[in-house]
Image (cartoon, rainbow, N blue to C red):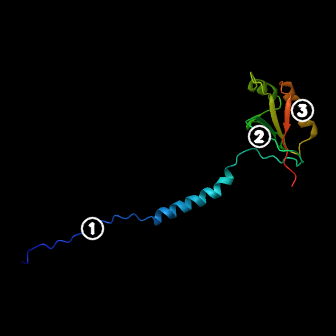
Amino acid sequence: MYGQNKRRITTTLSEINVTPFVDVMLVLLVIFMVTTPLLEKGIEVDLPKEAAKDVEMVEKSIITANKEQEIYFNEKRVSIDEIESVLKDAYIGRTDKEIFLRADKELPYGFVVKIMSKIKGAGINNIGMVTEPVE
């Protein structure tokens, strides 16, 4: 009886260890919580602070001018000379000829008036000035 093989009966572990899964999920949660505020993309503009009633922002076109006098139409950079033609092309066949103007408070008044003149020249008469509320 010395030659008999002794067999061991093994069982498989059928439980899933969820601790590593929870650890990974918590790390991902922290990463997303930290990076989400950084994902806000846009052109840096220091808007003037004025008391005004809130306007419901709908999908509207936005002209942005930063303090370096760079002009953007819906986050696409354009020159001051191109604004009128770009707006005419963008507003062909549209009935709602309205646009929002975000201008840095450090810009000279004459430059902002020049932008507004180009917007009016494109046939857009409703210009909304974007400001930040006074705290």
Q: Nearer the viewer, residue 70 or 130?
A: 130
Residue 116 pos. (x, y %): 88, 32
What's the amino acid at mark 1? Thr
Determine the secondary structure under disc 2: loop
Residue farthest along the bottom direction in this orientation? 2
Determine the secondary structure under disc 3: helix
Which of discs 3 and 2 lies nearer the camera? The answer is 2
Q: Nearer the viewer, residue 90 or 109?
A: 90
Q: Residues within 10 Å of mark 3 (few under 14, many from 20)?
A: few
Q: Is residue 62 left or right of residue 120?
A: left
Any mark on residue 114, and which? 3
What's the amino acid at mark 3? Lys
The quadrant of the picture occupied by the C terminus is bottom right
Question: Mark 1 vs mark 3: which is more N-terminal?
Answer: 1
Q: Which residue is mark 1?
A: 11
Any mark on residue 57, and which? 2
- Residue at mark 2 to residue at mark 1: CA–CA distance: 63 Å
Q: For the point 89% across and 29% down, which residue is it?
A: 117
Q: For the point 67% across and 50% down, which residue is it?
A: 39
Question: Mark 3 vs mark 2: which is more N-terminal?
Answer: 2
Any mark on residue 101, and which? none
Verify CB contact (< 8 Å) between mark 1 and mark 3: no
Question: Mark 2 vs mark 1: which is more N-terminal?
Answer: 1
Q: Is residue 42 left or right of residue 112?
A: left
Q: Residues within 10 Å of mark 1 (few under 14, many from 20)?
A: few
Q: For the point 84% across and 29% down, which residue is it?
A: 119
The quadrant of the picture occupied by the N terminus is bottom left
Query: Is the residue 125 above or below the residue 66 in the image?
Result: above
